Image (cartoon, grey):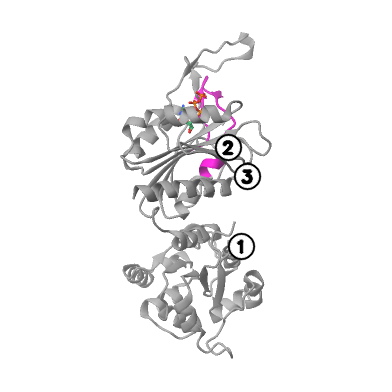
């Protein structure tokens, strides 16, 4: 899906070793459909050649103010771009931007810009900590320039003691996408997402759980954040990397998940309850590990709380509530029953037995069930399914104003 189709982005690269990672930033933005114009400082071109970026973006790369045929391009790009990302932004680049210097193509373009500017500082940790760099960063922030990073972690010269390392390309791309896509009705809205399974202890080492991977909930959290929402992702145990952006609250049991949901609920404008909380828990967990030699073990299970149903009376007025239904039979009838019983705006119904669908799959074939009827969506990636679900929620949010 080309989420950034036709969007115009300038990627400025200044001369730090992290510029090798900027190739990935250029590539990912291009893959998302953006038209990416890469501008290299003279020092950056010493690290990574223009031909590399040209091949990755399919567009000519600017390295100098004096390139024939590009005499006014600094003004044109400054006017036409919708977002300018500089990654890496070295200490020297930060100083030049803070002073409004215009002594090469990149800094001249920045002085001519209209678009928002996202700077991703990267340098030795001592240089980042230096009072002059700090002052430049504070000045830039006070003027509305967005700063992303740096992270703490391994630097070109040894292990840094403090931040200095450029944030990872995927994180830069996510922030760039959010800056480009943030819009009504998502901007400023709070979205609460639940994801993954929960685990209920049977004894100190064993749990009762289910096959949920958390992928659908993580995809929803990421997609809502990219549209500009403030997202809280309450997740049971999963092996997934959390998406950049959302606040992630890790929980273990259904009771833990219920408590985390209750804490975020009063402010939530949208609930996307994609988790598969354990519906039952051992009624009397054993204090000591059960041993096989002790013979057969019979488990008594008791129901846990229904987190989503329990939010009914405590949701913010006009909050949009979306439930998920994983069914092995009577899919539509039971999704429709859930719509009413849990007082939902939308149920995303999922056939547990369908090929390419279900808790462990990376794809999903879902049917969106609302009071207006049912719409079956094609088999697609969980990321694309998340976008389709949010398109529906967006219509509901816009109507509520
Ligand atoms: N859910 C929840 N708390 C639970 C169980 C489910 O909040 N303890 C939510 C899920 O996140 C999902 C929706 O309720 O959004 C439907 O889950 P499902 O297990 O299909 O619903 P149940 O009502 O438990 O279904 P059934 O009675 O058919 O088992």
Give the farthest residue toward the front: 372
Query: Who comes first in sequence, dot 3 or dot 1?
Result: 1
The residue lying at 56 percent from left, 46 percent from top is 385
Give the residue at mark 1. 31
Q: Which residue is mark 3?
A: 378
| Element carrying mark 2 | loop
> In the rendered image of this protein, does residue 168 appear above or below residue 8?
above
Most prominent secondary structure in the magenta stretch? loop
Question: Does residue 386 appear in the picture of this structure?
Answer: yes
Question: Where 152 falls versus 348 (above or below)?
Answer: below
CA separation in Å, label 2 and label 1: 26 Å
- Asked whether residue 22 is drawn in magenta, I would say no
Whole-percent x, y for residue 84 in the image? 47, 71
Residue 256 appears in view: no
Residue 251 in which image quadrant = top left
Which is more N-terminal, label 2 or label 3? 2
Q: Name the front one of labels 3 and 2.
A: 3
Circles 3 and 2: CB distance less than 8 Å? no
| Residue 100, percent from left and from top | 38, 81
Task: Name which quarter of the figure residue 55 lies in.
Answer: bottom right
Residue placed at 64% from the left, 11% from the top? 293
Residue 207 lies in the magenta-colored region: yes
The residue at the point 66 percent across, 34 percent down is 354
State which region is magenta: 195-218
Q: In which quadrant of the rendered image does the N terminus lie?
A: bottom right
Q: Which mark is residue 213?
A: 2
The mark that comes first in sequence, 2 or 1, is: 1
Q: Which-is-in-front pick, marks 2 and 1? A: 1
Question: Crowding near pointer 1: few (<14 within 10 Å), some, many (20+)?
Answer: some
Q: Is residue 213 above or below residue 103?
A: above
Residue 325 at x, y = what percent? 53, 32
How far apart are the alpha carbons under marks 3 and 2? 21 Å
């Amino acid at each position: 899906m080309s989420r950034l189709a036709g969007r115009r982005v300038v990627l400025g690269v200044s001369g730090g070793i992290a510029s090798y990672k900027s190739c990935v930033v250029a590539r990912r933005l291009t893959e998302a459909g953006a038209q990416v114009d890469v501008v290299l400082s003279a020092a950056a071109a010493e690290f990574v050649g223009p031909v590399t970026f040209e091949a990755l973006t399919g567009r000519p790369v600017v390295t100098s103010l004096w390139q024939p045929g590009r005499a006014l391009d600094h003004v044109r790009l400054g006017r036409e771009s919708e977002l300018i990302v500089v990654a890496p932004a070295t200490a020297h680049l930060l100083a030049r931007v803070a002073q409004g210097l215009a002594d090469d193509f990149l800094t001249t373009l920045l002085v001519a810009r209209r678009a928002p500017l996202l700077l991703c500082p990267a340098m030795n940790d001592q240089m980042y900590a230096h009072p002059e760099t700090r002052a430049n960063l504070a000045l830039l922030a006070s003027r509305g320039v967005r700063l992303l990073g740096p992270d703490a972690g391994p630097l070109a010269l040894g292990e840094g003691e403090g931040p200095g390392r450029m944030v990872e390309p995927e994180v830069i791309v996510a922030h760039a996408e959010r800056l480009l896509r943030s819009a009504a009705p998502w901007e400023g809205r709070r979205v609460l997402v639940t994801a993954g399974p929960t685990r209920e202890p049977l004894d100190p080492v064993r749990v009762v759980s289910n096959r949920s991977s958390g992928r659908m909930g993580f995809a929803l959290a990421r997609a809502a954040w990219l549209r500009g929402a403030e997202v809280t992702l309450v997740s049971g145990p999963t092996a997934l990397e959390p998406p950049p952006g959302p606040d992630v609250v890790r929980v273990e049991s259904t009771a833990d998940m219920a408590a985390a949901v209750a804490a975020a609920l009063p402010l939530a404008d949208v609930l996307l309850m994609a988790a598969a909380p354990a519906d039952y828990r051992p009624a009397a967990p054993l204090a000591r590990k059960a041993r096989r030699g002790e013979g057969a073990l019979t488990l008594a299970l008791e129901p846990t709380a229904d987190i989503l149903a329990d939010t009914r009376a405590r949701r913010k007025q006009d909050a949009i509530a979306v439930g998920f239904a994983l069914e092995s039979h009577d899919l539509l009838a039971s999704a429709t029953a859930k719509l009413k019983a849990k007082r939902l705006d939308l149920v995303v119904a999922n056939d547990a037995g369908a090929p390419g669908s279900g808790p462990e799959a990376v794809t999903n074939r879902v049917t969106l069930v609302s009071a207006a009827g049912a719409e079956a969506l094609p088999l697609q990636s969980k990321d694309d399914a998340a976008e389709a679900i949010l398109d529906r929620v967006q219509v509901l949010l816009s109507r509520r104003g």
